[in-house]
Image: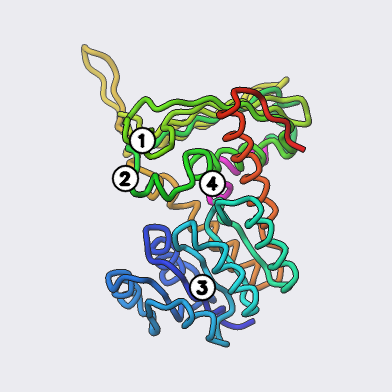
Amino acid sequence: MDSIKIGIIGMGRIGKIHLQNLCTKIEGVEVTTVANPSKVGQDYATRFGVQNVSNNAEIIFDNPEIDAILICSPSDTHADYAIRAALAGKAIFCEKPIDMSLERAKEVVLKVKACDVPMMVAFNRRFDPDFNKVKIAVSEGKIGTVQSLHIISRDPEPPSIAYIKQSGGLFKDMTIHDLDMARFIMGCEVTEVYATGSCMIDPAIAEAGDIDTATLVLHFENGATAVIENSRKAAYGYDQRLEVFGSKGMLQINNPLMTNVTSANEYGSHSDVNLNFFIDRYATSYLLEMQDFVEALGHRKSMPVHGEDGIKAIVLAEAAYASFREKRPIKIG
């Protein structure tokens, strides 16, 4: 394959990140077409040299020159676009979740397989250098037998209520990244999920049918346990930490800060604040994620994150909802 030609559906925050990386930092690829409902997003794509822009995604599906489609549109459109892309014979890069419904997500993966096109689900944190280093160390037995995993994921501010209402809820929108990371680090499957949560930040979130604070306990087939803590608001900024404890030691990831400058005076020592949000914290992971997608296409290799990974994350998110509602642990079949 010569230059890989890509179409992008959606020019929101994620679509813009992928467009910038593809147009300025990744070789052997050309973004030829962008579909976005607003002219603002279309104009943004034009500034990066995209020749074809439209408010209709059919401009991408109907173009025989396009090799791959990035689905960066709202979550409730992912399944329809993924199936449409598969039927058009295009490789697929799909932001999470594949769909809000587990059954619909399974249908998508089956249809993509039937069309024999590659599909990658975007769990960008797997490509973060820190998380990836921990994964490799665990896989190589550097800390012996893993006994426990602790993941902390807290946003600096909750999203808008309009977003909350269409997000699928905390477990499918936010925790799903941590559920995937837990599977990724452990290298085995979850056998049981227990979830508890409440609305501690904004009553409007509860009125919208969601929670903003949660704790999950996962049991794995290797006997280890993981604890995931989530909050929609941390006063001190974006909080993304992880610790793995094993028979021979411990691995820990702390928050990167705005700068590495520290100060000391009679009142104590002080460091800088946390990074603002995911766009800053995971800038490198978004680039590496897209580089791996392009490389897999160009060399016809297996995708680094499969549709099945997306399915398993949704299974765990739905188990978390069931556990929260029923106030009991949920076995994973």
Q: Is residue 228 left or right of residue 35?
A: right
Compare marks 4 and 2 and give the one earlier in the sequence.
Answer: 4
**Front one among 153 and 136:** 153
Q: Distance from label 2 to label 1 (Cα)? A: 13 Å
Crowding at dot 4, Cα within 10 Å, few <14 / some 14-19 / many 20+, comes out as many
Question: At 39% from the left edge and 34% from the top edge, which residue is drawn?
Answer: 232
Q: Nearer the viewer, mark 1 or mark 3?
A: 1
**Measured from the top left, where is residue 166 in percent x and y?**
42, 50
Characterize the local packing of mark 1: few (<14), some (14-19) or many (20 or more) Cα atoms within 10 angstroms.
Answer: few
Q: Nearer the viewer, residue 211 or 70?
A: 211
- Identify which amino acid the numbered label 4 is placed on: Arg
At numbered mark 2, what does the secondary structure look like: helix, strand or loop?
Answer: loop
Residue 176 highlighted magenta (yes or no): no
Tell me the residue at 38%/80% (across/down). Answer: 53
Q: Quick check: marks 4 and 2 in contact, CB under 8 Å?
A: no
Q: Which mark is residue 207?
A: 1
Q: Position of residue 299 (x, y in %)?
A: 68, 72
In the rendered view, would you say 31 is above or below 157?
Answer: below
The residue pinned by badge 3 equals 27
Which residue is identified by label 4?
125
Q: CA distance from mark 3 to mark 2?
A: 36 Å
Real-space Cα separation, disc 1 to disc 3, in angstroms: 47 Å
Which residue is under mark 2? 160
Magenta-colored span? 124-137
Which secondary structure is most common in the magenta stretch?
helix
Which element is circle 4 on? helix
Amino acid on which disc 3 is placed: Glu
Point out the tag, 4 or 1, that comes first from the N-terminus: 4
* Disc on the earlier residue, 1 or 3: 3
Q: Can you give x and y, in whole percent of width and height, for residue 22 in the image?
A: 46, 69
Of badges 4 and 3, nearer the viewer stands 4
